[in-house]
Amino acid sequence: MTMPIDKRDHIIKKAVELFAEKGFEGSSIRDLAAKADVNVAMVNYYFGSKEKLFEALVEKRALFMSQLIENVITNKSLLPIEQLDRIIEGYIIRFLADPQYHRVLQQELLITQREQMHEKIIELIAKNAFEIIQIIKRGIKSKVFNKVDPELVFASILGTISQVLMSRSLCLKIMNKPKDYDPYSDKQFHQRLTKHIQDMVHSHLLK
Amino acid sequence: MTMPIDKRDHIIKKAVELFAEKGFEGSSIRDLAAKADVNVAMVNYYFGSKEKLFEALVEKRALFMSQLIENVITNKSLLPIEQLDRIIEGYIIRFLADPQYHRVLQQELLITQREQMHEKIIELIAKNAFEIIQIIKRGIKSKVFNKVDPELVFASILGTISQVLMSRSLCLKIMNKPKDYDPYSDKQFHQRLTKHIQDMVHSHLLK
DNA sequence: GTTTAAATTAAACAACTGTTTAATTTTGTG
DNA sequence: CACAAAATTAAACAGTTGTTTAATTTAAAC
């Protein structure tokens, strides 16, 4: 009667790994079945179809993402710049914790093929975006912030992180690091990235 | 005897459109043949294989990209900040001129599947990146710039543009624009994006 | 006009795709 | 144990994939 959530989760986890490596269309169910060590029919048994597996994957991420902002926004006692700093920290911690998940969603954002899934991911990002934009707008109105472009400030924050996450080898190449180095799990790199974005936003927004 | 370059280019052009919409793996040669109005065998006749068509596509873009920086870098009479401003302008003009091309390359950057093509695109970006990083480093050394993080400043510049180009519908949603509006071909948006990145870089780098 | 190479075509190829079936095994419950 | 529901399996399904073939048309050169 009860769906074995753990097995579903296991398949999703392996699917993220595979899709991040080969892309959704580039991955076959037989590949996935082999990687997850289950029978080919199990994916359709648990999820109904390859596409619905993807939807379940996005759904799981959506839940994760929605918790991201809420924790920060509710704390109204913080100054606008402090709120932004907390959000930047939260973004970096959560995105860098699972680069593959982020890449799979980025892939889907780049193509317009599966329209409803495309829309879903956009909703996901936009929800967080509006919160950040609101904080900036309030800061401008209360004359704590310079008259910046709130929407594009958001694009710069998320864009910087996405740029770093997009390709590990590109990241290593630009930063001149050895091939065995993993920036995403390195605390020092976390700090470096956090500091850069915060510094940049501070100098841009604060008078 | 002579290869009909125009026909090759025509196929590449249609391939960019198709790949941007459905992804490389998601697009079939039959789709492409129909869209380009040629026989299915022609793609293999001209390019050898689907993958080599992609390589030709990347090659063509590489040529385009390499011209980007050169024009700016050679002008040594400019101040470091002026050089950066010219590069930002050049990036925005050229990237926004063909969002689909950019998206196709981003797709390939996200997956690690085709290793050599992945490497090629990374080379392409890194080449430009190092020039920009050098300008910033020189600016810091001559104490014209603050002690910023040169590599991550590059990530912010490119990341902001990529974030805007990633998905048109996401871009519209965040900027609260109607669905029929095309930001990429709008001069005003060009100016807005250029101003934002320049302003942000100025306040971050200049004392 | 004849000849040779290039371009184009429809058809066929084998391999792979997501999905379904029907049979079997496992699991949980009384 | 017995029984029913759930889980798992190998095999088969029909459709699509990239690619190749061999035949035909077009173009160029002399």
Image: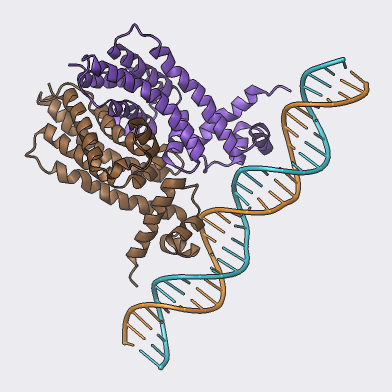
Chain colours: A purple, B brown, C cyan, D orange
Residue at 47% from the left image edge and 35% from the top image edge: A119
Q: Is residue B99 above or below residue A80?
A: below
Please indicate whether residue B207 sits to the left or right of residue B15 in the image: left
Q: Is residue B33 above or below residue A6?
A: below
Q: Is residue A160 above or below residue B48?
A: above
Rendered-image quadrant of the N terminus of chain A: top right
Q: Residue B199: image x %, image y %?
A: 18, 28
Q: Is residue B104 above or below residue A177?
A: below
Residue at 45% from the left image edge and 42% from the top image edge: A112
Rendered-image quadrant of the C terminus of chain A: top left
Q: Residue D8: image x %, image y %?
A: 72, 32
Give whichever of B168, A200 is nearer the camera.
Answer: B168
Give residue A189's quadrant in the image.
top left
Q: Residue B166: image x %, image y %?
A: 37, 38
Q: Is residue B23 visible?
A: no
Residue at 21% from the left image edge and 37% from the top image edge: B191
Please indicate whether residue A186 sits to the left or right of residue A153 in the image: right
Give whichever of B150, A175 is nearer the camera.
Answer: B150
Q: Residue A120: image x %, image y %?
A: 48, 32
